[in-house]
Amino acid sequence: MAKETKARYSDEELDNFRKLIDEKIKKAQADLELLRSAYMNDGNNGTDDTSPTFKAFEEGSETMSKEANTQLAIRQEKFIRDLRNAMIRIENKTYGVCRVTGKLINKKRLLLVPHATLSIEAKNMQK
């Protein structure tokens, strides 16, 4: 059996991941606020003086847009929750350890998907 090189990421590496995730959380929260304001905005778009046909189209489009923004907001909330869970794993020093294989998740993968809990190997086993 091959010898494991590392059981976990170093404190310095974890600190770098913490900074990356913290920035992603801040951006995600700002994006979420934009989405919330978009689907909660019930003001009109100045269609009061236009034809009734256009108004009906505008209202239908607005409803679809609100539904889409609501779905995006739900996904964004899940993303923020996953990032916060990653921060907890950093504090516990278990961040970057695959929950299936117990091996370290590739650093490049964590830089792209910082909330990942599965290695590529484990993801492929799910298929």
Image (spheres, helix red, strand yellow):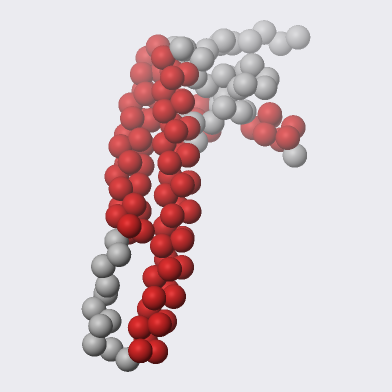
Q: Is residue 31 visible?
A: no
Q: Position of residue 89 (x, y in %)?
A: 47, 18
Please tell me which residue lies in front, 18 or 82.
82
Q: Position of residue 108 (x, y in %)?
A: 50, 32
Q: Does 126 sit left or right of 22 as displayed?
A: right
Please tell me which residue lies in front, 11 or 53.
53
The answer to which image quadrant residue 65 occupies is bottom left
The answer to which image quadrant residue 118 occupies is top right
Please tell me which residue lies in front, 100 or 53.
53
Q: Does 127 sit left or right of 85 as displayed?
A: right
Q: Residue at x 28, y 89 (%)?
A: 50
Q: Is residue 57 above or below residue 18?
A: below
Q: Residue at x 41, y 36 (%)?
A: 80
Q: How many marks?
A: 0
Q: Does 75 sit left or right of 120 as displayed?
A: left
Q: Residue at x 68, y 20 (%)?
A: 101
Q: Position of residue 12 (x, y in %)?
A: 37, 14
Quadrant where the C terminus sits is top right
Q: Is residue 36 visible?
A: yes
Please tell me which residue lies in front, 116 or 111.
116
Quadrant where the N terminus sits is top right
Q: Is residue 96 above or below residue 59?
A: above
Q: Is residue 124 above or below residue 48?
A: above
Q: Residue at x 41, y 62 (%)?
A: 66
Q: Position of residue 91 (x, y in %)?
A: 41, 14
